[in-house]
Image (cartoon, rainbow, N blue to C red):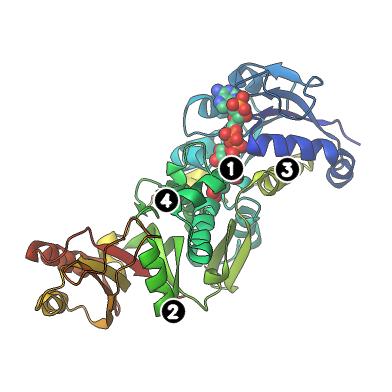
Amino acid sequence: MSDPLKLGLAGLGTVGISALQRLLAKENTLAVKAGRTIKVKAITARSRNKDRGVDLSQFQWFDDPVAMAKSPDIDVFVELIGGDSGPAEEAVRTALMAGKHVVTANKALLAKHGNELARLAEENNVSLNFEAAVAGGIPVIKSMRESLASNEISRVYGILNGTCNYILTKMEDEGLSFDACLSEAQRLGYAEADPTFDIEGYDTAHKLAILTSIAFGSEIEANSIFVEGITSITQTDISAADDLGFRIKLLGVAMKTDTGIEQRVHPTMVPKESAIAQISDVTNAVAIEGDAVGSITLSGPGAGGDATASAVIADIVDIARGLQIIPLGRATEALEPYERARMRAHEGGYYIRLRVTDKPGVFASIAKRMAEQAISLESIVQKKPRHKSDPKSAVSANRDMPQDLVLITYMTTEKAVRAAIEAIEKDGHIVAPPQVIRIERL
Ligand code: NDP
Ligand code: HSE
């Protein structure tokens, strides 16, 4: 057997501790599979004295991840700290420049600095592996970058955030409040250190940016993504979706269009009978459409310590086996500059919920504004006001109080919908910000 592969593990939180426990528990099996022993040599975290339920005395402790990244005692720097700058960024750069392989689960870092870090890895002839950064335990990076290498990919989309899918599932199935569901997702270790990243859609956007680059051979470009989170979704929307044959999911979608690459993240109405609508709780799913394989959907746990550690360790085993794959699936100098398709050109169906004053002529005035933008309506329903359980939408049953109008459009453009809503707002009939949810026919 070759020499042991020596690891420095930075971050001993939800993912770090699961990875450490698994590496210790599976040491013999992994050695057989990799052809050499994999040994954790050094560790670092913020607090040295925290009880983490594991005896850490056998490992060399570093207060500073950057010092560990250049230690001659490690071959691989495993970054499980998080954050798109600060110690994680500095330590990853240091490790690559010192000729160490890097394994990371940090999608925020890759979304911001991925092009440059991939270039650094290439220049220093080391691996930069990040399977865990997208969709937790699902092997989507390997599948797209390696197994589907001969395919021309036209669209990749999916549920990429476990926290949001967990929240939407619990709101739908158990009628629980948004805040209660978020607290539970945090308790279970699914959410980011700052959960705003989850619920406002940024975490999905970070993952989508990585998938887009590998799918289309373009530079990672996270700043051009249209992003909407799930914080405005109410029980009224969930029940209206149910009545209309849809479920609401936070989707990340990247596709080639005539004007460039469309990247968008937003709550989406998906038909109840579609495969993606069946994905519940913390489960993620990624659908990839390629010219040779047609459509492939991968699903599995998108967050949580053990599932994510599974992907981290797979990346480490690749390095132990001597398998070195170029990070973004092609040399960084061969990546195309990112060409952005404008969101206003997006075409699709829309769910629009308007809280209106219940007066004669309002209905007709809204229909007229839609017609002016050549928007054809598939249905228009007046929803009974909801009570108690939905504080965001609670109104009394009094006849003079506002009512919810739910409109479903046929195919139209984002530009037309925005113009119609602007005109409706100016008419003064609506008493709360309109709710717009895009419909994806899958
Ligand atoms: P946690 O917040 O649970 O853990 C972060 C760890 O980093 C802690 O051990 C913390 O130390 C340590 N840390 C923070 N700052 C420093 C520093 N300056 N120097 C050294 N160590 C530091 O995060 P997670 O384990 O949840 O996430 C880690 C990474 O994995 C993130 O990039 C995240 O996005 C990603 N990820 C997480 C998933 C999940 O389900 N949780 C799934 C997929 C990816 P201390 O414990 O002492 O505070
Ligand atoms: N916070 C992320 C999620 C972790 O909920 O999906 C996995 O990347």
385 in relation to 95, above or below: below
279 in relation to 16, above or below: below
Horizontally, is 301 left or right of 383 in the view?
right
Q: Examine the rendering and report whether any part of residue 412 can be seen.
A: yes
Asked whether the beta carbons under mark 1 and mark 2 sit within 8 Å of each other, the answer is no
Q: Give the labeled residue for mark 1.
A: 187
The image position of residue 366, as x and y in percent, is 15, 74
Asked whether the beta carbons under mark 3 and mark 1 sit within 8 Å of each other, the answer is no
Q: Is mark 2 within 8 Å of ligand 2?
A: no
**How much space separates mark 3 and mark 1, taking CA atoms?**
24 Å
Asked whether the beta carbons under mark 2 and mark 4 sit within 8 Å of each other, the answer is no
Describe the element under mark 4 as helix, strand or loop. loop
Q: Earlier in the sequence, mark 2 or mark 4?
A: 4
Looking at the rendered image, the disc whose residue lies closer to the viewer, 4 or 1, is 1
The image position of residue 396, as x and y in percent, is 26, 64
Q: Earlier in the sequence, mark 4 or mark 3?
A: 4
Looking at the rendered image, the disc whose residue lies closer to the viewer, 3 or 1, is 1
Describe the element under mark 3 as helix, strand or loop. helix
Q: From the viewer's side, name the closer residue of 343 and 57.
A: 57
Horizontally, is 159 left or right of 269 in the view?
right
